[in-house]
Amino acid sequence: MNRTGSIRTLGAFGVLAAVVRRDLLLALRRKSEVFTTLFFFVIVVSLFPLGIGPELGLLRKIAPGVLWVAALLATMLSLNRMFAADYADGTLEQMVLSPTPLGLMVAGKILAHWLVSGLPLVLIAPILGLQFDLAPRALVVLVISLLLGTPLLSMIGAIGAALTLGVRGGGVLVSLLTLPLYIPALIFGAGAVEADISGLGAGGHLSLLAALFALAVFFAPWATTAALKIALE
């Protein structure tokens, strides 16, 4: 019995890895889309220090909100493409008909989306944070909050992308659907950095952000799967 369970677990991880690998290879063929997200993030964040000037106190105060809002908007740029290509060429229908659980393949696509659109933002955020004169401790909190928050943005965005799949003007609709759901992540993510800068401690905000992340891990693939099945009917 234990051996059977181990085989099934290995099979599940194999499917997950195969979906992630496939989506990453497809993303590498469309490098312009990947760089657009990163370029947008860099440009938006860099414009604020240039526009405000060398007022370090003000820059430190607005830094958490600017970095988080820019990351949120950058992540949204690629949401409408998460399932669009598979829907257009019929791959999504084959996934639904496959004996492999659709939720597992959806989880792989969400993970691939984060690796392409979210992880680069996390890696470059500390460098951009230096423009706002953030202390090393605040930069560490920023990275932790983005590591918890950007996957959450991808999971929530997957639900919106599935609900608007095949709908004309889906890019606008997915923004309208997901923006209200992004607000808690924005509040706790930016709030963690603000609390650390103020000396209040970021533990509470990060704990709440981690709780939202855990809930999304369990419910987002299921909700996305249900939305995809509705879109294909």
Image (cartoon, grey):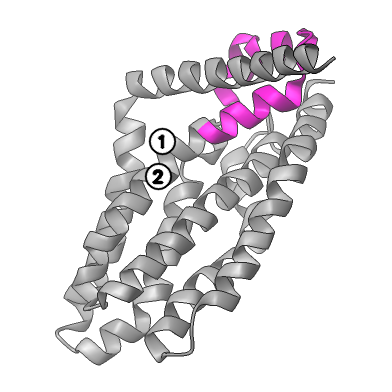
Q: In this rendering, is residue 155 above or below 33? A: below
Residue at point 38%, 71% (across, down)? 66
Residue at 35% x, 86% y: name it: 61
Image-quadrant location for residue 93: top right
Mark 1 is on which residue type?
Val
At 40% from the left and 74% from the top, the residue drawn is: 64
Q: Position of residue 74 (x, y in %)?
A: 42, 51
Q: Residue 99 placed where, x, y %?
A: 79, 8
Local crowd size for mark 2, using a 10 Å CA cut-off: few (<14), some (14–19), many (≥20): some
**Disc 2/disc 1 C-alpha distance (Å):** 7 Å
Contact, CB < 8 Å: mark 2 with mark 1?
Answer: yes
Q: Nearer the viewer, residue 39 or 8?
A: 8
* Residue annotated with mark 2: 119
Characterize the local packing of mark 1: few (<14), some (14-19) or many (20 or more) Cα atoms within 10 angstroms. Answer: many
User: Which range is magenta?
Assistant: 84-111
| Relative side of 193 to 174, left or right | left
Q: Quadrant of the N terminus?
A: top right
